[in-house]
Image (cartoon, rainbow, N blue to C red):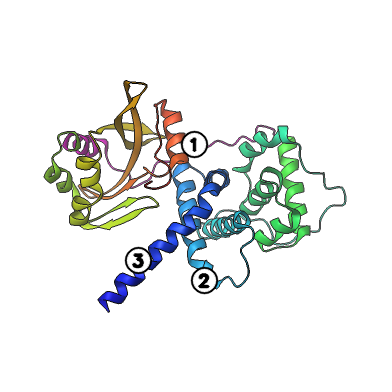
Amino acid sequence: MAELSKDLTREVRMLRVRYFQVVDPLRPELYRYCRHLARNVWDAEDLVQDTLLKAFAKLADVHWNMDNPRAYLFRIATNLWIDRTRKHGESEMPEHFDAPADAPAPLPAETREAIRALALALPPRERAALLLKDVFDFSLEETAAYLQTTTGAVKAALHRAREKLTQSPAGGATRAAQGDESAPEAHLLDQWCAAFNARDMKALTSLMLEDATADVVGMVYEFGREQMENGSLAHTVVEQGNPQAERREFMGEPVIVLWYDVEEGGKTRRVVRDVLRFTQDGASLSSLRYYYFCPETLAEVCELLHLPLVDNGYRFS
C-alpha cells in the first residue's frame, strides 16, 4: 500500500506538471477575469487557484477533446464564482428574461475600462455576462453556456448592464479591499518580522499555533509547526538568500513583504519578491499564506504600495 501511495503521488505530480504547461500561458487572462469578478485581490487569487484545482480534478470526467482550454477555465471560474456569491447571499438577477428587441450592439473597445469599473456594482450574473461578452469577447452562445442560461437571458442581462453603464459611466464602483475579520494585530506581525530577520526559527514557530497551516499558494500546503519549520519557513529563512521582512498596511490589513537583493547590471537592487498574509486565533497566528508564485497578485499589491517588485513566475523553474 505504501508503494502504491508513492507511485500514485509521483504520477499525479507528473500529470500536474503537464497540466500547468498547458494552462500557465492562460493564467494572466484568467486572473484578470477573476479580478473583475472578485471584490479584492485576495479573493481573485483564491478564485484562480480554485478554478485551476477544479479544472484539473474534472479532467477525468471530460469525455471529449479539450480543444479550448481557455473556455474550459473561464466556464469553471464563472460557475465557481456564481456558486460562491449565492452562498454568501449576494443579489441575483432572475434566471430568464425576454430579450428586448432593441438590445444594443457590443460595446467598442474604448468603453471597456469603464465596464470594468462598473462591473463590481452589478448583480453576479449581469457582471459575469458583461465581462464574458464585452470584455473577454466570448460569443452569446458561449456566455449562455457558461452561465447555464439562454442567449435571451444573456441579451437581457447585457441590456440592463449597459443601461447602467450609460446612466453612470464611472460606475461608482471601487476595488477597495476589505480587511479580513481574522487579520492579525500589527504587534504580532512585528514580532514575527523581528524573529524572521533574526533568523530565530524557534521564536518564529512559537508565534504560530501548534496546528497552524501554511500555504505557498498554488504550490505547497503544510500542517503544523513541524512541517512549516522543515518546509516553507526553512526554505524562506535559510535557503533562499537573506530576505528581510517588513510589516506594511494593505487596504486596512497588516501584511508582511519580503525584501530581496537582486543583481542587475553589476549592481545590487533591493526589491520585493513575496507578500505574506496571516490569520490570528487568540494570541497566536493560525495560518500563513505566501504569494510567492502569484505574479498578478504581487504586481497589484506592490503597485498600490509603491514597492519595486521582481516576480518569480508560477512555480519553480
Q: In the picture shown, does residue 18 fall above or below 133?
A: below
Identity, as a three-letter code, of the amino acid under mark 1: Ala
Q: In the picture shown, does residue 11 fall above or below 264?
A: below
- Identify residue for label 1: 176
The first of marks 2 and 1 along the sequence is 2
- Identify residue for label 2: 60
Disc number lying in front (3 or 1): 3
Q: Residue furthest front?
A: 266
Q: Is residue 222 left or right of residue 34?
A: left
The first of marks 2 and 3 along the sequence is 3
Q: Main secondary structure of the magenta part?
A: loop
- Work out how far the residue at label 2 is from the one at label 1, CA to CA, in angstroms: 38 Å
Name the residue: 40% across, 66% down: 12
Q: Is residue 62 left or right of residue 280?
A: right
Provide the secondary structure element on which disc 2 rests.
Answer: helix
Q: Residues within 10 Å of mark 3 (few under 14, many from 20)?
A: few
Disc number lying in front (2 or 3): 3
Name the residue: 51% across, 57% down: 51
Q: Residue furthest bottom?
A: 1
Q: Residues within 10 Å of mark 1 (few under 14, many from 20)?
A: few
Is residue 280 located in the magenta-colored stretch of the structure? Answer: no
Q: In the picture shown, does residue 176 fall above or below 11?
A: above
Q: In which quadrant will I find the N terminus?
A: bottom left
- Work out how far the residue at label 2 is from the one at label 3, CA to CA, in angstroms: 17 Å
The first of marks 3 and 1 along the sequence is 3
- Identify residue for label 3: 10
Task: Give the image location of residue 71, x and y in percent.
Answer: 63, 56
Residue stretch rendered in magenta on the structure: 168-195
Identity, as a three-letter code, of the amino acid under mark 2: Ala
Q: Nearer the viewer, residue 127 or 312?
A: 312
Task: Give the image location of residue 131, x and y in percent.
Answer: 65, 46
Task: Give the image location of residue 214, x and y in percent.
Answer: 29, 52
